[in-house]
Amino acid sequence: MRNPKVIHGLCYSLTSPHLPSRKAAAEILVFFCHWEEEGVDRVGLEHVLQGLSNVESHHNNTRGIGQKVGRFDIWLQQLSMTVDGRGRMGSTVGLSKDLKGTDDGTILDICVRDMVRIR
């Protein structure tokens, strides 16, 4: 909590093409969101939200006006691409290159965990 740059850096990992990195980053960020949940200022949650805002700003500064995104949009787009990149009916037909070598259980686990975090 003394060095929020670490938390901000973890937010960039949510958009990593490496699924285990995304999963680990999301789990760590959820922990920080619940840090001192009963406290008045909720420092951990503020650091995570600021990190997501940094990701948003970085993305918006490097893109054109028509490609501006919100704070959670990049993460949700990655989740959508993960689901869409899954092969036809669980096979390897149409499987995206980012998902090669992962089984259906891992993909399902990541999607379910991300959806639980979103709500």
Image (cartoon, rainbow, N blue to C red):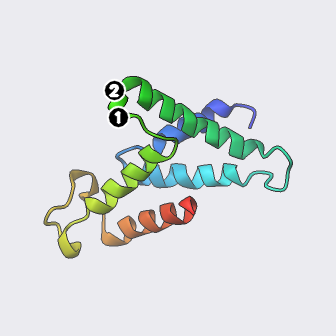
Residue 67: assigned label: 1
Give the percent coordinates (x, y) of residue 116: 54, 66
Which residue is painted at 70% across and 31% down in the image?
Answer: 3
Instruction: Identify the element where label 1 is drawn.
Output: helix
In the rendered view of the protein, which quadrant contains the N terminus?
top right
Which corner quadrant of the image does residue 62 belong to?
top left
Give the percent coordinates (x, y) of residue 6: 61, 34
Which residue is painted at 82% across and 43% down in the image?
Answer: 41
Q: 64 or 82: which is nearer to us?
A: 64
Q: 118 or 18: which is nearer to us?
A: 118
Give the percent coordinates (x, y) of residue 115: 49, 64
Alpha carbon separation for disc pair 1 and 2: 5 Å
Instruction: Identify the element where label 2 is drawn.
Output: loop
Task: Note whether 89 is above or below 36 in the view shown.
Answer: below
Which residue is painted at 21% across and 52% down in the image?
Answer: 97
In the rendered view of the protein, which quadrant contains the C terminus?
bottom right
Give the percent coordinates (x, y) of residue 18: 36, 48
* Mark 1 crowd level (few <14, some 14–19, many ≥20, 10 Å Cα): few
Q: Amino acid at mark 2?
A: Gly
Report if the CB atoms under discs 1 and 2 are less than 8 Å apart: yes
In the picture of the structure, the residue carrying the numbered disc 2 is 64
| Residue placed furthest toward the left | 93
